[in-house]
Amino acid sequence: MSMLVFTSEEALHLALTSGLVPAEVQAAPARYHRTPDGALHVLPEVMPAKDVLAHLASLGVQVTRSRAMEATPVLCWAELVTARRVPLESAPTGPVLFLPPSADALLPLAGEMLRLGCDRQEVCFAQASGESGQRALLRAMAPPYFTLTSALDASGPLRAFVPAVPGQHAVWVEVGYTHPLARTLHAPAGTLLLVRGEGPWLTAPDGPWTDLYQHTDLRLPATGEDWTPAPPPGRLTVPLRLTRAARTEPASLWVLREDALAQVESLVHTVPEPLLAQLRFAVTGPPEAPCIVLRARAGRERPPELGLSGMAYAPLPQLADLFLPCDGLLEPPVRRDRLRALLVPQADTVTWLHPTGDGGFRAERLPESAFQPLDTWVDYVVDADADALMPWVRSASFDFAAFEAAEGEWQSAARAMQSDEEDDRSPRATRRSRREAPAPPVTPASPPPIVAVRVAQPAPTGVRLAPLTPAQSSAVEEELSSLEKSFLALEVPADSPQRQELWTRMAELNGRLGRKRDASLCWTRALWSASDTEATELARRWSDSENEGGATPAERMASPAPTGDDVRGVASSLVRAVRVPGAPAPVDVAALQRWLDRHDAELDVRALWLTRTALDTLAGGDALGLARAGDRLLEMLQRGLSLARDVPRFLRGGTDSAHAPRVLAQLEALLERFEHTPRRRSSIEAAPALTLAYVRYVFAVGLARLGQADRARPLASAAAEAVDAKEAIHGFLSRAYGARVAQALEGQPPETPLPSDIAAELNALGTFQRYKVDRLRQASALLEPSERLDPARAFGRGARDLRGEEFAALRDVKDPAQVAARVEALTGRATDATLPAEERQRIIGGLLDTLPRVAPARALPLLNRLVSSMEALPGEAQAVMLGDALTLAALFGRADHAMTLAARLRKVLTALAPTSPAWGQGILGVSLRGLRRVGLSREAAELVDAAQERLTGPKTPLTARLGVAAGLAMQGRTAEAVDVFDAAFESLGAAKGGLPERLALMRSLASALAHAPVELALPGLARISEGLPIITDSYNTNSHFCLSVVELADALVLGHVEVAQGTGARARSWLDEDEFLVRRRIHRELEERT
Amino acid sequence: MSSHPAISELTFDALSSEAHGLRERLNRFRLALGRHFVGKQTLVDLMTVAAVAQEPLLLVGPPGTAKSDLVLKFRDALRIPNEDYFEYLLTRFTEPSEVLGPIDINLLRQGRYIRREGGKLPTARLVFLDEVFKASSAILNALLTVINERKFYQDGAPQPVKLKVLFAATNELPEHAELGALKDRFCLKAACRPVQDRYFLELLDSGLDSQTHREMNQKPWAEGHATLDDVLKAHRYLTLMMGKRETGPDGRELRDRDLFFRDDLLREFRRVVQTLTREDGVFISDRKLVKLYRLLRTRAWIFHGGAVERQDLQLLSYLGETREEIDLLEEKVPRLLGLS
Ligand SMILES: Nc1ncnc2c1ncn2[C@@H]1O[C@H](COP(=O)(O)OP(=O)(O)O)[C@@H](O)[C@H]1O
Ligand SMILES: [Mg+2]
């Protein structure tokens, strides 16, 4: 007898799968012996043919004579290959075959599964050939995991198997194992092959299978009892009543019965036109005492507060055309279809329940068509003509269709309805149809033309006497402001000649008004894009205006404390000296340079660059100095143009002066709301006075950002008084907010880091204190505008910086050269191909945060390296990082890089699941801003489109969609954004999800709304604040404040600030373009000159 | 207090001779105490097991469900004197000194930071902390060490505490990461539920009785069936027993589980743990597993004096970490075990 010797199991495996061993040989039984060194000696029952043996031998399979040894039998060769263990993650949903150790063990097994809810079980009993006697198999569909754990226990007696190939039921593999050849196996018809993980394979007859219940006798605890149906003993009477109850729906229907006309007249006199446009009206009753019904149009706007003395009604949430008094509800609650049949039997009518006292009511209704827009009723006339018009009411009117819904009515109607419904079930005999036909609605007469009087404009009141001096000044002012308006209205690129001209004019006018700083900002803008010849002229005029009647540059430089005017005077003279032939040139260039080094922080970015290039020219080329200046400027631009430093007043906060007062008024009202709204409070919520202190801080920072020093300061000190500054957490936060107020009032950009002494306090806090502080820093964008924090994780790890200690340490390094060297070394590590992905992600993330500290020339190549090593990272991580990289590219002013990155980002975003948390991280906003900074508005639009396309599905989280809506609004595509806003409001209204999600939604909504036009943004923000009464939490931060309340305040205040600062999409996108112009020239000149 | 050293020096043999009596007394104690409440026998049993095993127990439930009352009567019934008992209602304004003892001002002047611990947590053997999660971080941190290491820090130096039995109560289970550590220290967490739906009248009767007793300053539940010393002795007895190594008839060394935890029950134990972990995401740390073994053994000894039985595995119902898990497990574990 021959024996085949395979050197290893792999060799055998290969011989089997490659077909070297013919199928009929493999399928036949064999015996084998495994040597200690892993070789397999196989004694086949069916011997392969000679040529096969020869072939095998040529591949190193020895064929020898069999030696005497102990050999284990197998059913087929596949059994020689060992099965592998795999973890069982969850219970299979398909069939599982259980092999209990004996037939006796079957019953407890089946019983356990029955108990746990699995009753699709079949059993098969068989007489085993060996000594084991009766065997049994049990096949169960979707057995409980608990039962499988028994089979997973290798030392236990129970075995379980699942189909080797889903869908076939002949070959089964033991649960918890896979066998590499299982899919290729076949069992003879009528036989089951059971592939065991360890131990010999088994076969069993496939059936007969019988349902478990056939072997089960169910015993009832008592014999059944038959009941016979009997007719109901009588009708049930339920009085329907109107009871007083608090409701949240705002009034949207008013019935004016007394002095109706006068009330409407007063209304149209006092309510703004847009509000009137939301109202519709119908007149009814006798002409001498008409009754007027007003109704707010259903829609996304909340109905207006009208303060009318009539009865106010709100619709039932489940039945929009049935109105109940605002403080009333029907008792008992009745199903919607019943209510409809009882009270609103006809479509297209509006029904309201007029309370008649003691819970009784009368349903009154008008046809829908009786309502007309209120503004069509109003003719706007000037006062002078008022007497000529008399209000009158057309006699056409309607009578209310009414019926008392006292007890009897309800009973009968309810009965009628019940029998309608139960037609099929209840015996006919009990049905009595006594239902009264509801009164038919009155048909509307022709539209009632009613005239009210309203003053549209003040009538001219005689000749106006212009006071002398102020008049001139105001004429200049008027001219300036009209120029500013036309500037904003212009549809041409930022560097077009028309704008040039306007800048020059505005510069002059500002100069005449004595607004030197604004004048200077206009001059440098005019100069910025001017051609050479123009520039010469403009430089002369700028310098003239700066130095008009002032000291000479030399005198200015001699001043011990030069003012901004002095620095600009010197700067403009310097620029002029280089431009204008024959202009007086400074004698000591080096001294001038040193002086500027000390004082040029007073200059805006353009003036600064113009001065530095002028110095470069004067020095006959100073590449190093210029490069240094370039780096400095780009660092200044890191957060965009500084409103305070670089932007003329009319483009700054409260940009659109028409809107600023509205925003401020609403902010004040909002603060009042936070101060006085009673909230539901959790049992451990912080004392309201503490929370309020932080709310006040938040408002103080917001108002400070809007330049309201006289409001911000007192608010901040009121807040400071309410907390104990000696305590570590209150102390830090109090100082931090205070610093933010001061910074904002000084006009520093919001991203300015906290003063370093305050920031240093952070490291001194204990972990737990730090956690609480970080929670607030994370929740308050006004406190911490730029850091991405994750306090819980940081706390969990006790880490100073989540990106890792390297980066915490980097923060302490001050020397730029050292920073660059370390960043370079870390880049080397991050791009090392052997680095595990997670580690790579961590380091790249940290580096992207740090790169702005490195000079652009050094940083850009590093950025490129980092970006190309991101490729293999997960999509979400890539998306966030590409967004950051794009911002960096824009920061370095590299449109080419930004364009490539945008394309990549688009690709990554399109592959992201709509539910990915990455969407909520503001990547889109960051990237859009970056793209616009480098003038890539088409790419920005494409990115928004791509995201929008990806995020249309119904599963898309609202926060993600709001990100897109913000992008859309930023681009002026308001109409598309509104749908998302609506959906968000709806979700908030439905109070879905936990408070944290809702707060997150409120925050996203507020920040998205801030990009929409004022008319939409302000009411929207107000509406968000209506959620306040239910905001509370039981976080441990309640030792110091209620975080959620402060977070809501922060989201709302920030929304207002953003609305005010960027009023009008135009002004905002203008700022981005403006920044682009600055960057473009700096980059061009840097390249030309260095 | 002369008895403590005595207990800690008792030998296994000495305790063995007493074991039967101990068990009887403890069982009489728990059954008698249970009768002073309505529908709380399971909790009283659990408290007894936790006390003997010296594992902290957390009672979770809305106000007015007798959480405090359970502990108070437990204490009275064991006749624990004032110096061995400390109870405190924690709020976030509670100062560490209220729990750990005030700083000794005289020593502080000498630059030493020492708490005068008399009458506070460090000297008590039974401690009840009400609303435990409301405590400030300083207290929470101190509690962690107390529970973990039975120590607290005096002037930077570890100082042993006398704490043996810790009960805590809470109204809600906060889900903040920072409280997770403390939550994890309570191996057992049991819901304390209102019983009025099931036992309306009984509750009224029992409540009235309680009220009367309180006003008459009577404590009929202090029946003197068992004492704290009994609890401590039982603990020592079981500890010594579980640490014993015996040799079987075949010369093989027998472990505790060979004697007191049948293979098939160990399997069931493991299956329940596996199922809860996989299906419900309940986290059961390795440390907890060992504690569970000890708890199961303790319960088995108290209830039937011998090896672990299937019904003892009900203890696994108290592993939930959140309100939802607690509710789920109390229903699911008995169902898995076929005990419901
Ligand atoms: N199941 C109960 N059996 C007996 N008394 C009860 C029960 N539930 C509540 N009580 C009584 O209600 C009162 C309130 O209990 P208490 O221990 O203060 O509740 P908690 O600490 O949970 O807020 C106690 O007097 C207690 O006796
Ligand atoms: Mg209590």
Image (cartoon, rainbow, N blue to C red):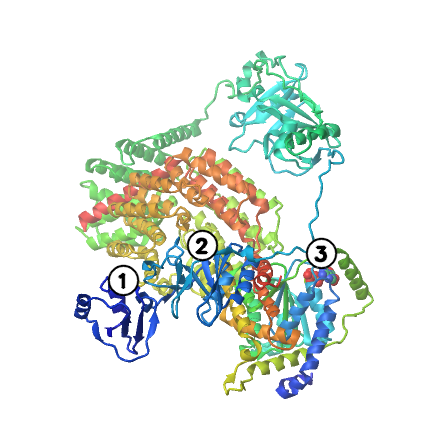
Q: Which residue is mark 3?
A: B198
Q: Residue at x 40, y 46 (%)?
A: A914
Marks 2 and 3: same chain?
no
Q: Which residue is mark 1?
A: A24
Counting from the top left corner in percent of width and height, residue A452 is at 58, 18
Q: Residue at x 33, y 30 (%)?
A: A490
Q: Which chain is indicated by disc 2?
A: A
Looking at numbered disc 2 in the image, what kind of residue is underneath it?
Gly
Q: Which mark is residue A94?
A: 2
The residue at the far right in this view is B216
Counting from the top left corner in percent of width and height, residue A605 is at 31, 46
Compare residues A925 and A2 and report the one nearer the observer.
Answer: A2
| Circle 1 residues within 10 Å: few <14, some 14–19, many ≥20 | few
As helix, strand or loop, the secondary structure at mark 1 comes to helix
Left or right of residue A421, residue B185 in this image: left
Q: Is mark 2 within 8 Å of ligand 1?
A: no
Res. B120 in view: no
